[in-house]
Image: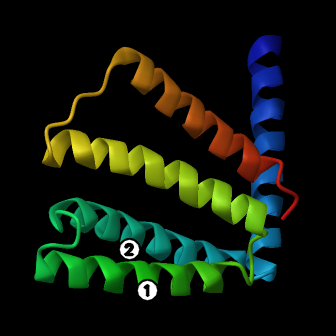
Amino acid sequence: MSGLLYISKKTCFSACWLAKLSLTYFKRGAAMAYCYLLLAICLELIATNFLKLSAGFSRLVPTIITVSAYCACFYFFSLSLRGIKLSIAYATWSGVGIIFASLLSYFLFKESLTGWQLLGLGLIVCGTIIANLTGGH
């Protein structure tokens, strides 16, 4: 019973800490900043995949989509920097971008992922989480 009580206190403390943390983000406008960052990441993934399809900028439509998506990506990334520190925003952008670019290349372009590559991607996820949790927003 005491073990259950200990877990409950720990869980309660964690929930309170997360609630306080989310209120801090909301007050500073970080919620919207993270929305801009998510949009920038999505646009970067679109641009990167169309970059591969552009075949060295030799195909017009994929080239136009690539350039447009990168421009929009950097615009929204710059907006995210109003509420997120550059180091945290860039770590998140890079980490999440690498993970999803790897997954998209695996599913869309049938590129392989080895066990070592999956381990590396897992470490990137851990690093991105640690950077966000300790970033001092």
Determine the residue located farthest toward the right in the rendered image: 136
User: Would residue 85 appear left or right of 122 to someone viewing this image?
Assistant: right
Give SS at disc 1.
helix
Q: Which residue is mark 1?
A: 72
What's the amino acid at mark 2? Answer: Leu
- Residue 74 image offset from top left, x and y in percent: 53, 80
Q: Which residue is mark 2?
A: 43
Q: Are marks 1 and 2 in contact (CB under 8 Å)?
A: yes
Classify residue 60 by image quadrant: bottom left
**Residue 111 visible in this rendered orientation of the protein:** yes
Comparing 3 with 38, the one in front is 38
Quadrant that contains the N terminus: top right
Comparing 113 with 8, the one in front is 113
- Answer above or below: position of 43 versus 29: above
Classify residue 69 by image quadrant: bottom left
What's the amino acid at mark 1? Answer: Ala
